[in-house]
Image (cartoon, rainbow, N blue to C red):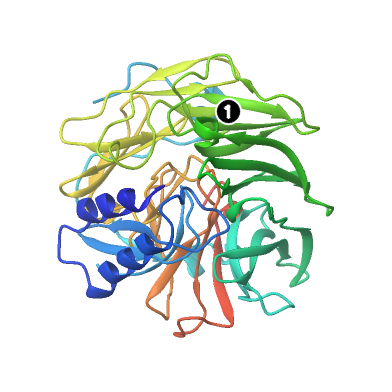
Amino acid sequence: MRTEDDLAAALREGARSAPEPDLLAGVARFRRRRSRRRTQFLAAAAVVAVVSASTAVAGGFLSRRGGEGVVSPTGPATSAPTSASTSASTPAVSMTASARIPAVEAGDLWPEALFTMPAKNADGWRYRPITALSATEVLLSAESSFERSGKIEIYDTKTKESRLVTEVPKNPDLKGYIAQTATADGTNVAWFAFGQQADGTPVRDIWTAPLAGGEARLIATRTGADAEMDAIALDGDRVVWSLRQGGVWHVPLAGGTPEELPGGAGLHLISWPWASDMAEGPPNTERNQTKVVNLTSGHVNRLAAPPGVKGLRCGPLWCYGRTEQGGLVQRVDGTSRRESRDLGFAGGLSPYPILDRFLAVGGGVYDLRTGKRVTVDNPGNWSGVGTSSEASTILYWGATKADKPDKFRVLNLAAVPPAQ
């Protein structure tokens, strides 16, 4: 989601039942704040999540993948997957029935993936989880004030301590400067930040820093239409991003002249090296993706949505779409299909499978590999999905019923064993 109009349209689409009054008030407040705001990684805003037939609105910093939110209770492909090794290592799960899916508690099935961590850093700045770097490390944004990220940090579940990655720079020459969507590859973190020139021209700066720690470096600045970025990724010694209007670009980490990536015309990054032909948000919310492209090999998987499915989104192996019954999952080749009300999506506006294995669904996670639906013990009335450019591996919620708890309870999907 990128603008307030996007948010309003998504609310109309998602809220088949009447929304709570404070949701509409939140939209009005959001509209008054900034009409320029797009995919925000380090700024607070609102994300809509459709949970079965219920609605939820997320009040965290906005990204194309996640955010925090109030929880309400509640055609086959024409070519095979591109990764033979991935397909072979993933057992086929029979998904033919539309019946309810039994659930198991995450603490019982994946105890090693659950942990509790502070909700604030040593300076008292509130954390916004971004994504997991490993089974034991979580990348975090620390907000010095509302909607203002001041630092990027890493929390280690083994040592139970946080360390500084970098301070998030400001640009005093631009109005309303806000750091946005981030990505990390185990060695570096990269993000873009949005601001406006005095005449209203949009500007996006691309920043990077080593995860080991160090000063952030500005490696490229884009203005006008070239600033309309919707996703970012790291590929070795370069940063790659896609544009809202379609097209994939790259620039060396060392800096240089940005260039358009051959074969990326009209595409939008999912997670490197995968890309889709479908931009997110209205007017594309109900449109079905028709291909998934490997930008490294150039291989294209053609997709065809089953009848009645809307918003089909596919990674390299798995697809998810919305139906009148809730949601549908299948492999990109159309096999292992299942439809159920328990598959209503709850992870923001972008239901690409997480790690091409998991879906954030109402009350928990659905494991595409095993066919298990896993719930979480949430003492409060809100939950969050980590915000990153690619589908985040982090789900979190308050450890207590407080609206702003001192501790988060976190589910790290990167720590889930392959066989479970």
Q: Residue at x 35, y 60 (%)?
A: 31
Pointer 1 local density, CA inside 10 Å: few below 14, some 14–19, many at least 20: some
x%, y% of residue 125?
Answer: 66, 75
Which residue appears at 56% of the width and 21% of the height? 295
Against 417, is 269 above or below? Answer: above
Q: Is residue 155 above or below residue 292?
A: below
Residue 266 is situated, as x and y percent measured from the top left of the image, at: 44, 21
Q: Amino acid at mark 1?
A: Pro
Could you tell me residue 83's position as x and y percent?
53, 24
Location of mark 1 (residue): 273
Answer with the quarter of the image where residue 153 lies. Answer: bottom right
Compared across the picture, whether 135 is left or right of 176 comes to right
Q: Is residue 141 left or right of residue 298?
A: right
- For image coordinates 37% across by 30% down, the residue present is 278
Question: Which secondary structure lies at badge 1?
Answer: loop
Whether residue 4 is visible, yes or no, is yes
